[in-house]
Image (cartoon, grey):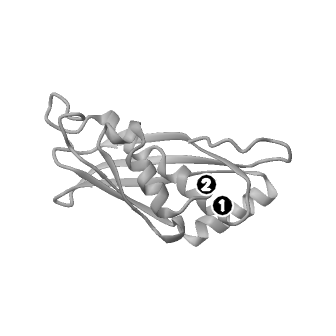
């Protein structure tokens, strides 16, 4: 389903798995070329070490490459199934304050996906995410592997994220 940047921002803000962990979409870039996200430290996601629970941090990064590629490719006429295939995370420093991250997908990334979808039918690629605290210190480094499949005629386009 193609939606506007504002509609998806508000839908994601109140999506229960993100909302209750205080994961807040600040904005989607025009055309879904990127996203800015804030993970608010709160009593709901704080661990015994007074830092943000690792599961919250991981959940914060989970859906966004899939969402961006889904919206970008639908706008270019593709019927796709997109999901996070795998992920790796390194906690470099405790998240004792709010954490912030930005994701940007380049035109080269989209062109590569289009080319592979039109030839092979399936695009799989890993992308980095870095999360910073309010002082600008790198706290978390992730790699999310996105899976995009060009759907065949007759297959239902269910949302897979």
Q: Quadrant of the C terminus?
A: top right
Under tag 2, what secondary structure?
helix
Tag 2 near tag 1, CB within 8 Å: yes
Task: Estimate the x, y position of residue 59 in percent, counting from the top left.
Answer: 39, 39
Is 69 above or below relative to 154? Answer: below
Task: Estimate the x, y position of residue 19 in percent, counting from the top left.
Answer: 34, 41
Is residue 103 in view from this perspective? no
| For residue 30, side relative to residue 137 (left or right) | right
Is residue 9 in view from this perspective? yes
What mark, if any, has residue 160 been given in the picture? Answer: none
What mark, if any, has residue 70 been given in the picture? Answer: 2
Front residue of 92 and 86: 86
Q: Residue furthest right?
A: 153
- Give the CA separation, mark 2 to mark 1: 5 Å
Q: Residue furthest top?
A: 48
Q: Give me the residue at 55% from left, 50% from top.
A: 66
Q: Categorize mark 1 by other alpha carbons within 10 Å: few (<14), some (14-19), many (20+).
A: many
Front residue of 106 and 56: 56
Q: Give me the residue at 23% from left, 33% from top.
A: 44
Q: Categorize mark 2 by other alpha carbons within 10 Å: few (<14), some (14-19), many (20+).
A: many
Residue assigned mark 1: 73
| For residue 146, side relative to residue 54 (left or right) | right
Q: Give me the residue at 71% from left, 63% from top.
A: 114
Q: How many marks?
A: 2
Q: Quadrant of residue 26?
A: bottom left
Task: Estimate the x, y position of residue 119 in percent, counting from the top left.
Answer: 81, 58
Q: Quadrant of residue 130?
A: bottom left
Front residue of 93 and 53: 53
Under tag 1, what secondary structure?
helix
Task: Estimate the x, y position of residue 158 in percent, counting from the top left.
Answer: 68, 41
């Amino acid at each position: 389903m193609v939606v506007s940047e504002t509609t998806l921002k508000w839908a994601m803000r109140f999506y229960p798995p993100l909302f209750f962990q205080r994961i807040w979409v600040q904005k989607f870039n025009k055309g879904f070329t990127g996203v800015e996200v804030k993970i608010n430290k709160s009593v709901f996601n704080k661990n015994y070490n007074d830092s943000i629970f690792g599961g919250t941090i991981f959940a914060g990064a989970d859906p966004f490459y899939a969402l961006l590629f889904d919206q970008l490719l639908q706008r270019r006429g593709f019927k796709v199934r997109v999901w996070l295939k795998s992920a790796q995370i390194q906690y470099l420093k405790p998240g004792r304050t709010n954490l912030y991250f930005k994701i940007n997908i380049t035109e080269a990334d989209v062109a590569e996906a289009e080319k592979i979808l039109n030839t092979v039918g399936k695009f799989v690629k890993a992308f980095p995410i870095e999360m910073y605290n309010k002082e600008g210190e790198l706290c978390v480094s992730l790699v999310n592997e996105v899976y995009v499949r060009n759907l065949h005629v007759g297959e239902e386009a269910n949302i897979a994220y």
